[in-house]
Amino acid sequence: MTQFYPPLEEYKRFTIEFMGLQFNFLWQWLQKHPEEDIRHAIRHRIDLCRKTDPSPKHFDVATIDYNRPEWIELENKIIDIFSDKNLSANPEKFEETALSVSSKILIRFAELTWGSNGKFIDYQCGSLKYDTPEPNKPYQIMFHIGNAVSPKSIFEDRNYLKNCFLMLMDQTEKKFGAKILYTHSWLNSLPKWLEYFPEEWLNNLGPEDKNVSWGYGHWGQFISAKGVLNEKYAKFLRETGEFPFWPRSSTCSFSEMRKHLATL
């Protein structure tokens, strides 16, 4: 399948707008959590550090190096901006000023990553990817969700996700003897996603995860099917400081999932 990428200029604009949204959120988060160290928040609440790393390894969270000189310089500039009440009088002013010191780095990142080959090469089942089971949970499969059919939505063809799930269960059952599905995602708060799951999944839904991390279990909802900013959801976050959909965890058995998918 040929992968879709928005035009380069559009992708560069998205990269800046997306980080601007995260700076806006960061300001609001720190107002609500004044006890939190800003350096910790910059590193763990928003996805900025990876965008200062031009190497392919930036996708791997385990390789993040907070001691790189370029990162330390940028991080200190953002901390100084936040500490200056004239430059961070409100979320919009902080967003604008933080972008002014980071935009060149963000544009470089966009230029280097635009059209990257193999964006979904490790997604074994269309728009779904599974991990090797953890030793203490040998029958449980953790899966991740992407969009390998962009610019279309994964929900456009009702059979598409259904077939992705059937493929995932068939593969992991044969490969690992897996019997249980698990994920943690903002999608677990989205009604049209939940339509694909049996009652067991709905009953097992955990609490809303409001401990915001830089990962896309939280931030993925702000990326549209076309790979640009979801303006509707971004507007909600700017106005309320809240995410439209909070991540939740859930599990269900393969057997119940297969029975439910057969009814769709």
Image (cartoon, helix red, strand yellow):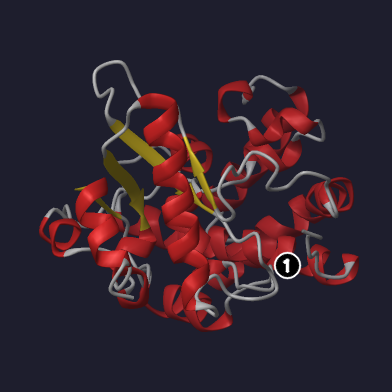
Determine whether, in the image, residue 54 is placed left or right of residue 66: right
Residue 245 in sight:
yes
Q: Which residue is mark 1?
A: 14
Q: Residue at x 58, y 62 (%)?
A: 94
Q: Nearer the viewer, residue 5 or 102?
A: 5
Q: Residue at x 66, y 36 (%)?
A: 59
Q: Quadrant of the C terminus?
A: bottom left
Residue 251 in sight:
no
Q: Residues within 10 Å of mark 1 (few under 14, many from 20)?
A: many
Residue 251 screen position, x and y as percent: 22, 47
Determine whether, in the image, residue 209 is placed left or right of residue 217: left
Residue 135 screen position, x and y as percent: 30, 15
Determine whether, in the image, residue 71 is placed left or right of residue 111: left
Q: Nearer the viewer, residue 79 or 187?
A: 187
53 vs 28: above or below: above
Residue 106 screen position, x and y as percent: 78, 51
- Looking at the rendered structure, the secondary structure element under dot 1 is helix
